[in-house]
Amino acid sequence: MPWSVRAVPLPDGDRPADLWIDAAGCVSAGPVPGAEPLPGRYVAPGLVDAHAHPCVGPGPVARNHAETLDELTAWAASGVCLVRDTGSPGGSALQLDPGPGRPRLQAAGRFLAPAGRYFPALLPEEVPQQRLTELALAELARGARWVKVIADFPPVVDGTPSGPAGPTYSPEAVEAMTAAVHAAGGRVAAHVTTDAVAQLVRARVDSVEHGTALDESTLRLMAQAGTAWTPTLCAVLAVPGTAPEKVRRRVAEYRERLGELLPLAHRLGVPILTGTDVAGTLAREVALLAEHGLPPAAALAAATTTGYRFLGEPFDQPGRPATLVTYQDDPREDIEVLSSPSAVLIDGIRVR
């Protein structure tokens, strides 16, 4: 069925514009006869979850195929149209075919981490340093567009992370792996929560995941290199009531620093991405970015246009399958609006 949309384009528009979708579900350069109007007064390209684990459930544990597809179906109904999977147990995401009506998926394959330095349930095969490059390239050969390196992590004792995080691989090993992945046409996402982040940026990783030890000098390096930052605030700011006092204090201190780091990253032009990890919702992630210093339009851009551009996915070209989400009210005025989309199309298929 052909569709028409007359709505204010997000994240930056200020007046309604017309968008047409033909009977094949593709964006049209002009009006389409018989088009049915979609509800909603504001339209975005579709939300982007750039740090997600659809194959991982709470625990963490591995989800089976059916559970993963159910999760992706629920994300689609909420307006999430593009997902970057940042690691799955044994690379199970590479075996997924989400199918029509579910988000587009960019997969990173298995978690790259050595023995005893990641959640055992998610690491069926460890990756020793001497095989880091070899096994990263093996993920690309299996169909991954990204590889996910666990660049630092606490030692795991009896299945539980214990003590402070430390580097898992040498800077030289990560740099060699990254160069090889780039030469093969892939990209590298790095889990990092320590000051090893500066070395990783110098090693030319493509995105910093979490980045809780970022500072001004490293953000400037990222701006020069084009390195993206996915803060995953739903995950890193979540503190259980049973958490030790030192943990609560550390998170409170990080909240204060975010008020400086996020606006600075935005001013420098660092691509800021939204990612839920295994906690919260994308609407909540956008709200947290805005609460911690990003202008609302910039927070919304992180979940839409910035994500598509950084991940290299088309979203508004004539002749391409239409992917969009509409809202009755302006989410820049009230972020909670993101939780209630009026309509969702993914590659020309209406899912809401």
Image (cartoon, rainbow, N blue to C red):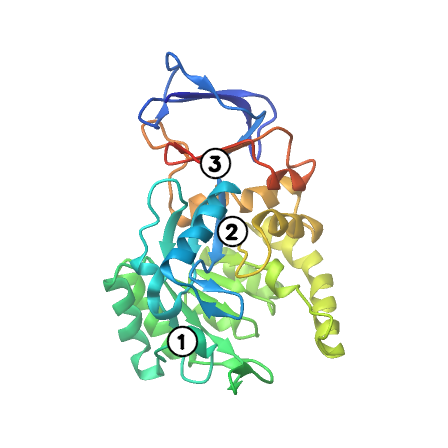
Quick one: label 2 or label 3, which is nearer the N terminus?
Answer: 3
Of the two numbered discs 2 and 3 in the rendering, the one whose residue sits closer to the viewer:
3
Q: Secondary structure at mark 2?
A: loop
At horizontal 71% and vertical 56% (from top left) the residue drawn is: 259
Q: Which mark is residue 45?
A: 3
Is 1 placed above or below 79 here? above
Label 3: few (<14), some or many (≥20) within 10 Å?
A: many
Of the two numbered discs 1 and 2 in the rendering, the one whose residue sits closer to the viewer:
1
Quick one: label 1 or label 3, which is nearer the N terminus?
Answer: 3
Q: Position of residue 168 (x, y in %)?
A: 45, 81
* Amino acid beneath label 1: Leu
Q: CA distance from mark 2 to mark 3?
A: 17 Å
* Amino acid beneath label 3: Pro
Q: CA distance from mark 1 to mark 2?
A: 29 Å
Q: Which mark is residue 271?
A: 2
- Answer yes or no: do the residues labelled 1 and 2 have beta carbons within 8 Å? no
Q: CA distance from mark 1 to mark 3?
A: 34 Å
Is 36 placed above or below 210 here? above
Comparing 90 with 211, the one in front is: 90
